[in-house]
Amino acid sequence: MAASSAQSSALGRTSEAMRWGQLIFGIICMVMIANLQYGWTLFVNPIDQKYHWGRAAIQVAFTVFVLAETWLVPFEGYLVDKFGPKIMISGSGVLVAIAWVINSVADSLFLLYVGAAIGGIGAGVVYGGSVGNALKWFPDRRGLAAGLTAAGFGAGSALTVVPIANMIQSSGYQAAFFWFGIGQGLVVVIVGLLLRAPQAGDVPVVTSHAVTQTRRDYGPAEAIRTPVFWVMYLMFVMVGAGGLMAVAQLAPLATDYKIANVPVSLLGLTLPALTFALTIDRVLNGICRPFFGWVSDNIGRENTMFIAFLLEGVGIYALLYFANNPVLFVMLSGLVFFAWGEIYSLFPATCTDIYGRKFATTNYGMLYTAKGTASLLVPLSSVLTSTTGSWHAVFYVAAVLNVLAAIMALLVLKPMRVHATAKESSAWLDANVVDAR
């Protein structure tokens, strides 16, 4: 903490205010795109009631959105690194608005899918650009900054769930799509104009013993050729898919144990067990991102990964065996949610620590495609359930994936990163000695 204070004191007040202002602007943009993913569920039934396309066909739009939002981020990140966040994020605000306006008038599945694709592209630019900008502005608090920014996406929709639901109820889903689309997109356009990448002297030089950072910037082609990148990618997929598999089976688990509608009273709230469990998702999934990011700034990335991933694995395993108790079901599902979302702060921070600041958006964009890969693996949980005749196997697999990722963080990722950093430092010193001569 003392080192962090010393680093901060080296900055002028204007620069420090600028850093936090940039972080806040990025968070606001993230909050404005959160509904494109987390608010979608509110529209599925109203759309089906109007056009009778079937929920499965309508949900294809969500898959299109997720794939467009994740798989295009490397290319979008390259454009953000090249042209800056202002142009790219403001322009994407227009796409965000267009996407929901299209949804408001979509009278065919094809048009609905087009809207989803456009929304995914816009959201991907905003997500990648906002996280990348936070990583660049906060080398001394990279985990916390990435976590706070990612929390804006994870928990941002909580502010507008009720207003959107009320508008759907009173004015129809088309009006909700149209007006919230225009409003959210307009905010992204305006706030995006205030964003900029840091220049020399805007950020502190980091000398932390807990977090080792590279002395040079790796281009995307260099980063993707290093073994440590693919170790991180595999771990990202394992934890992401494991968590999604477990969460996808929460409703069947609660139904089979006949506790889904049993009232549970916690923290002054009384809700049916399943509703309670799903409600705390957004809250804890948002809180965990800056929390574990902050922890990683102080004790190291891999050490934090080990704690979080192991906690997730144990939580999933315990949830399976204590799910017959409604209170424990809610508490343990909360633990699972809390130990899951931190991948969106730990991995971007680690990626930038290893590969540098200049191409932070692009390099993390390549790693972020692991989210899309993980989502493609989730349907396998349904295959596993139907093959074994039980969802127990899914929980076992999910728990094992998280425990393996925790072990890999300490025994594989950490040694590889230390070795790569030591090799790079040696090469840097040799080059500087030669220059000095």
Image: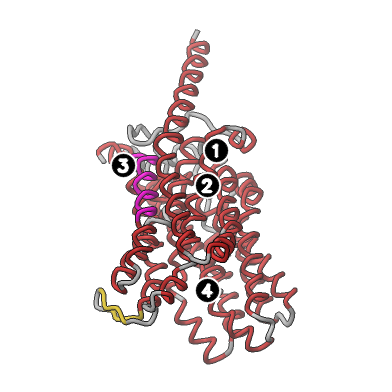
Asked whether the residues under the numbered discs 2 and 1 touch, taking CB atoms below 8 Å apart as contact, a structural biologist would say no
Question: Residue 53 versus residue 430: which sits nearer the camera?
Answer: 53
The answer to whether 2 appears left or right of 81 in the picture is left
Q: Earlier in the sequence, mark 1 or mark 3?
A: 1
Q: Is residue 277 left or right of residue 348?
A: left
Residue type marked 2: Ala
Residue ID for mark 2 = 197
Which residue type carries mark 4? Gly
Residue type at numbered disc 3: Asn
Q: Which residues are magenta?
A: 300-314
Task: Name the residue carrying label 3.
Answer: 298
Q: Quadrant of residue 338?
A: bottom left
The Cα atoms of the two marked residues, 4 and 1, are separated by 32 Å
Spatial CA distance of label 1 from label 3 is 23 Å
Q: Residue at x 68, y 65 (%)?
A: 117
Q: Amino acid at mark 1?
A: Phe
* Residue beneath disc 4: 39
- Mark 4 or 1: in front is 1
Mark 3 secondary-structure assignment: helix
Relative to residue 353, is residue 278 depicted above or below? below
Q: Which residue is mark 1?
A: 229
Of labels 3 and 4, earlier in sequence is 4
Q: Disc 2 to disc 4, how far (Cα)?
A: 30 Å
Question: From what the image shows, is residue 11 above or below residue 396?
Answer: above
